[in-house]
Image (tube, rainbow, N blue to C red):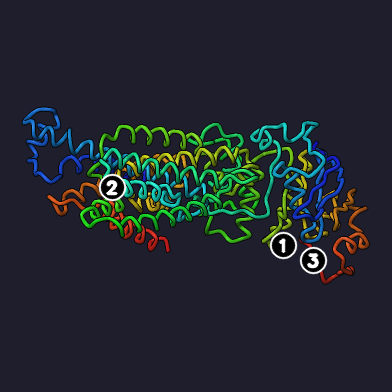
């Protein structure tokens, strides 16, 4: 149990090493080593530094953002089933992206529509969650679930109307896919900013688990903390969805994996969740690229296939 | 000194407290008694600054609670709430240490001073051997004592406790009441909502009786906790229990 932080921290370089070593094109160890040092043939250098490294970083950023958002939402809503999809942001982005694909928009147009859909969903959750007595987590939950259902229906409608030639691309977007992920720099900046901001409130988040009244009585500015957690979770979800589509399961499972491994203080839980979520998604994406190469599988399918048995195993051990 | 002046509290259109003037001085231990739904919890929440009264004001040493920062207030007033939604994953010691939050400088690192205070508190409440155990594996009574230890670790001049004896067996009821009386003797202000007048009479020098429809009376326990007052308070006949009833010493 005490080994969890060390294992997670070792997993980060290991996941990057595997993501860079393996792919659709076989690179012999010598050629790979040369390319890593910036020497050797140009094709190998381009594969390592132009394709695999940015893709590994994109996977890390996306997984880290989803796990961080899941952590924050689970404490904000005091609901162990909360994950980024519960905000309706993923659904809004999916409806926007698929609508743009149906309209024949280019990649930039799809990204813009996904962002617009996510922003509309986040704005609606925020507006409906502010009651007369201030912020209300239960309204966040209900509004998010309602929006997610509504967007789910809209996505179903778009899939029904779409010509069969477009459906596979849409399904990949819905299942989560890092192949079209571009420059991960913006997502990494959002990850660092959200992780830093949320970690600065780690002690208050620990106390918030006891309930809002207890947290207030212990000196926590609860409304401000809710706004910070909701803002970071929303921003993280939007950034992740724009990078990798609607990748499920990482945001739900990673925080639980860490808690079941004995990590519960947010000072450790938040950064470790970002590292573990990022590493797992980078690993899952490596598998997605290599298992059926040259074809690529949707990475969201693999995150679920890895995450479900691991979580069930940990739950069984704790029974 | 925690003062409530002309306090009026209502809930769902029902008046719970009307024009209550209450002064809780250092060194005093107060019992708060009343029927279920009389407004004990609402009064404790108002005294702790967790809810705004419909009228009147609560002040700590003359400063309205609304004028004191949330964290500053938490260093001076601690509250044991009746209900707590908690799915806490850590150990009993981790749980109790959350009482240090108002004084903590950082969420990182070890709070040696807090740990040095927490361990004797756990021992005082018979939880010394439970420190490393997972909080969620505790029984209801053990959790209640851990919650009390957390409140005591907050190390405040005022302690407001909503049903501190719930879930506790006789031995631990006496232990907790002694712990509260000791704090009062040491100059802290204690107010506890209780359901057992015997504990109130034995350990609390003062009592507030909350009747229905917002009426309250308060004073020394010896004057307040009479058979006639308690029959009026609980709206039922009472009789001396004599040898058939026991209170832990």
Q: The residue tagged with tag 2: helix, strand or loop?
A: helix
Q: Secondary structure at mark 3?
A: loop
The residue carrying mark 3 is B246
Q: Nearer the viewer, residue A23 or B247?
A: A23
Residue located at (42% from left, 39% from top): A235
Q: Which residue is mark 2?
A: A101
How far, Cα to Cα, is label 2 from label 1?
Answer: 70 Å
**Circle 1 residue:** B170
Residues at discs 2 and 1 in contact (Cβ within 8 Å): no
Spot occupied by residue B78 in the image (x, y as percentages of width and height): 69, 42
Mark 3 and mark 1 lie on one chain; the one further toward the N terminus is 1
Q: Position of residue A273 (x, y in %)?
A: 38, 44
Report if the CB atoms under discs 3 and 1 are less than 8 Å apart. Answer: yes
Measure the alpha-carbon separation of dots 2 and 3. Answer: 77 Å
Name the subunit of mark 1.
B
Tag 1 secondary structure: helix
Lateral position of residue A158 relative to residue A262, left or right: left
Parent chain of label 3: B
Q: Quadrant of the image for the C terminus of chain A?
A: bottom left
Can residue B62 be seen in this snapshot?
A: yes
């Amino acid at each position: 149990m005490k080994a969890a932080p060390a294992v997670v921290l070792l997993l980060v370089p290991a996941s990057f090493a595997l993501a860079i070593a393996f792919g659709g094109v076989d690179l012999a160890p010598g050629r790979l080593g040369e390319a890593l040092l910036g020497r050797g043939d140009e094709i190998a250098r381009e594969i390592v530094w132009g394709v695999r490294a940015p893709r590994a970083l994109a996977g890390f950023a996306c997984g880290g953002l989803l796990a961080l958002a899941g952590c924050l939402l689970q404490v904000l809503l005091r609901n162990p089933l909360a994950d980024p999809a519960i905000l309706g942001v993923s659904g809004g982005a999916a409806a926007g992206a698929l609508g743009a694909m149906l309209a024949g928009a280019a990649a930039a147009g799809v990204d813009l529509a996904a962002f617009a859909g996510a922003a509309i969903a986040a704005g609606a959750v925020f507006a409906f969650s502010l009651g007369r007595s201030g912020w209300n987590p239960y309204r966040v939950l209900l509004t998010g679930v309602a929006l997610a259902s509504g967007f789910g229906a809209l996505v179903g409608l778009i899939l029904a109307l779409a010509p069969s030639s477009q459906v596979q691309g849409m399904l990949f977007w819905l299942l989560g896919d890092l192949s079209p992920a571009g420059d991960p720099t913006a997502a990494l900046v959002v990850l660092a900013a959200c992780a830093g901001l949320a970690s600065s409130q780690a002690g208050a988040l620990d106390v918030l688990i006891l309930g809002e009244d207890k947290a207030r009585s212990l000196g926590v500015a609860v409304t401000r903390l809710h706004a910070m957690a909701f803002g970071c979770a929303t921003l993280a979800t939007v950034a992740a969805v724009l990078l990798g589509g609607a990748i499920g399961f990482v945001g739900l499972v990673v925080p639980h994996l860490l808690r079941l491994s004995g990590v519960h203080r947010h000072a450790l839980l938040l950064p470790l969740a970002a590292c573990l979520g990022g590493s797992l998604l980078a690993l899952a994406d490596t598998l997605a690229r290599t298992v059926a190469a040259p074809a690529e599988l949707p990475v969201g399918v693999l995150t679920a296939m890895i995450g479900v048995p691991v979580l069930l195993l940990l739950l069984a051990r704790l029974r | 000194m925690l003062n409530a002046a002309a306090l009026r509290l209502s809930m769902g259109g029902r008046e719970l407290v009307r024009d209550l003037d209450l002064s809780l001085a250092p060194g005093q231990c107060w019992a708060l008694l009343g029927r279920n739904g009389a407004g004990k919890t609402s009064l404790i929440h108002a005294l702790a600054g967790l809810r705004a009264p419909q009228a009147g004001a609560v002040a700590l040493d003359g400063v309205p609670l609304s004028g004191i920062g949330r964290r500053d207030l938490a260093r001076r007033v601690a509250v044991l709430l009746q209900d707590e939604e908690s799915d806490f994953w850590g150990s009993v010691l981790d749980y109790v240490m959350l009482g240090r939050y108002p004084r903590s400088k950082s969420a990182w690192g070890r709070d040696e001073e807090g740990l040095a205070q927490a361990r004797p508190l756990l021992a005082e409440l018979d939880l010394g051997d439970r420190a490393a155990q997972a909080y969620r594996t505790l029984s209801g009574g053990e959790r209640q004592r851990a919650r009390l230890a957390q409140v005591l670790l907050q190390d405040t001049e005022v302690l407001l406790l909503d049903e501190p004896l719930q879930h506790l067996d006789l031995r631990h009821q006496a232990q907790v009441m002694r712990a509260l009386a000791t704090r009062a003797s040491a100059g802290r202000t204690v107010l506890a909502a209780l359901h057992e007048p015997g504990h109130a009479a034995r350990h609390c020098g003062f009592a507030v009786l909350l009747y229905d429809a917002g009426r309250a009376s308060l004073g020394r326990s010896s004057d307040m906790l009479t058979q006639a007052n308690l029959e009026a308070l609980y709206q039922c006949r009472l009789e001396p229990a004599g040898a058939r009833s026991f209170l832990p010493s």
